[in-house]
Amino acid sequence: MLRKTYDWVMTWAGSPYATWALFWLALAESSFFPVPPDVLLMALSLSNPARAFLYAGISTIGSVLGGLVGYFLGHGLMEVVGMPIIEFYGATDKFDAIRTVFTENDFLAIAIAGFTPIPYKVFTIAAGACEINIFIFALASIMSRGARFYIVSGLIYKFGEPVKVFIDKYFNLLTILFVILLAGGFAIVKILMK
């Protein structure tokens, strides 16, 4: 089923509505849809490198708005809509762990989730359910989702098809390295501010 959904998403790459499809895909993925917008973002950026950064911006806006949809699903409709989505993805245990993470550092938790292959929708719904400050949520989402999409588009703009193959192959490893660097950066800032 996931492969069919992926193939369906890719059919939009050649469509005159590809830009709108990218926006709606980014929005839906942040709250309930399983296929990340990166696949369509890469296809569009490869087909028109001059617009790669425009596509990254569209992905960021759609994703952050979708994150806010997820936030409000968790905040106001947790039992009716939020939990069924989390259960569908088999992320109930992750949801409970995320509640604990939010008490330690909500900004960092959202920033890491927004950049990594961890299902961002679980974090958006959990953020609403845990009543995380919406401005912190939005800022962390803009920064992390923007960084993710602009890095992908920038690399494709600069290096083309070879970087797409590299990103596809090593995405999880690259994500882990980024999270280590991000967490290290926050730790350094925290030490310097003491």
Image (cartoon, rainbow, N blue to C red):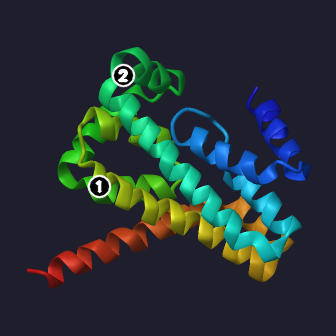
Question: Which residue is identified by label 1?
Answer: 135
Percent from the top left, x then y, of residue 51? 77, 71
Q: Residue 101, percent across and down?
A: 26, 47
The one nearer the camera, 90 or 146, is 146
User: Where is the C terminus found, in terms of image quarters?
Assistant: bottom left
Q: Residue at x 63, y 35 (%)?
A: 34
Amino acid type of the residue tagged 1 in the rendering = Phe
Question: For residue 172, which numbered disc appears in the image?
Answer: none
Residue at x-position 35% and y-position 30%: 74
Q: Residue furthest top?
A: 80
Quadrant of the rendered image containing residue 105 = bottom left
Circle 2 residues within 10 Å: few <14, some 14–19, many ≥20 = some
Is 7 or 143 nearer to us in this picture?
Answer: 143
Residue at the (38%, 38%) spot, across then down: 71
Identify residue for label 2: 77
Between 178 and 14, the residue placed more toward the observer is: 14
Q: Earlier in the sequence, mark 2 or mark 1?
A: 2
Counting labels gives 2
* Whether residue 122 is visible: no
Element class at badge 2: loop
